[in-house]
């Protein structure tokens, strides 16, 4: 996202955008890739509500936030970032957004402070963060599956 300092993410958090809704997909490649045909579109506040449930020491991935087979990946990524920035802008009532990872346990560079800030917060909670890659460096929580929070 750009110009974060000029946006009111808490207003964006409350914009339902005519959601939630579930769409049935019929594309066989997508069904195989995501493991089902029910694609969930949730408003940003729904992501916030679920992300608040994750206790210290536990983790969540963006794709496991809904009760459908999978969340629409582009809007899910945008809305999780909105949750993070809205929390960052508040002085109280924080959402522990740093506990929500991308697929495969990857840290989210679009969170406030980037991967360095998320890495620091996760390590304070006992997680081990590993770097992978030489040119396209990414960061992952080691054995993140063992710390996944069951919704």
Image (cartoon, grey):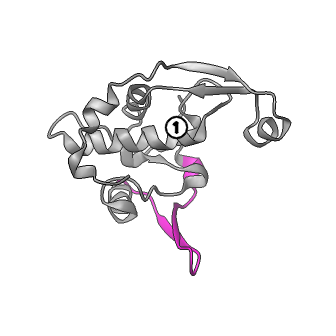
Q: Nearer the viewer, residue 104 or 46?
A: 46
Is 137 part of what is drawn in magenta? yes
Residue 53 occupies quadrant:
top left
Task: Name the residue rendered at 60%, 26% in the picture.
Answer: 40
* Residue highlighted by disc 1: 75
* Residue 56 in sight here: no
Q: Is residue 113 above or below residue 137?
A: above
Residue 69 shown left or right of residue 137 in the figure: right
**Which region shows up in magenta?**
125-146
- Residue 132 is situated, as x and y percent measured from the top left of the image, at 57, 72
Q: Give the farthest residue toward the left.
A: 91
The mark tally for this picture is 1
- Residue 65 is situated, as x and y percent measured from the top left of the image, at 53, 32
Task: Name the residue rendered at 45%, 55% in the picture.
Answer: 108
Task: Tell me the crowding category of disc 1: few under 14, some 14 to 19, or many 20 or more residues within 10 angstroms, Cα based.
Answer: some
Task: Name the residue rendered at 35%, 38% in the picture.
Answer: 83
- Residue 135 is situated, as x and y percent measured from the top left of the image, at 56, 80
Q: Is residue 90 above or below residue 125?
A: above
Q: Nearer the viewer, residue 94 or 90?
A: 90
Residue 137 shown left or right of residue 121 in the figure: right
Residue 72 occupies quadrant:
top right
Q: Is residue 60 above or below residue 142?
A: above
């Amino acid at each position: 996202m750009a110009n974060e300092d000029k946006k009111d993410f808490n207003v964006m958090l409350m914009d339902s955008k005519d959601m939630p809704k579930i769409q049935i997909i019929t594309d066989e490649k997508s069904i195989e890739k995501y493991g089902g045909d029910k694609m969930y579109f949730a408003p940003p506040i729904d992501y916030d509500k679920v992300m608040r449930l994750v206790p210290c020491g536990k983790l969540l991935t963006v794709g496991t936030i809904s009760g459908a087979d999978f969340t629409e990946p582009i809007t899910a990524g945008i809305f999780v970032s909105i949750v993070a920035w809205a929390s960052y802008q508040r002085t109280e009532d924080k959402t522990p957004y740093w506990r929500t990872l991308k697929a495969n346990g990857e840290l989210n560079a679009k969170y406030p402070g980037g991967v360095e800030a998320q890495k620091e917060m996760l390590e304070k909670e006992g997680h081990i963060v590993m770097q992978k890659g030489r040119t396209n460096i990414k960061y992952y929580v080691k054995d993140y599956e063992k710390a996944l929070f069951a919704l």
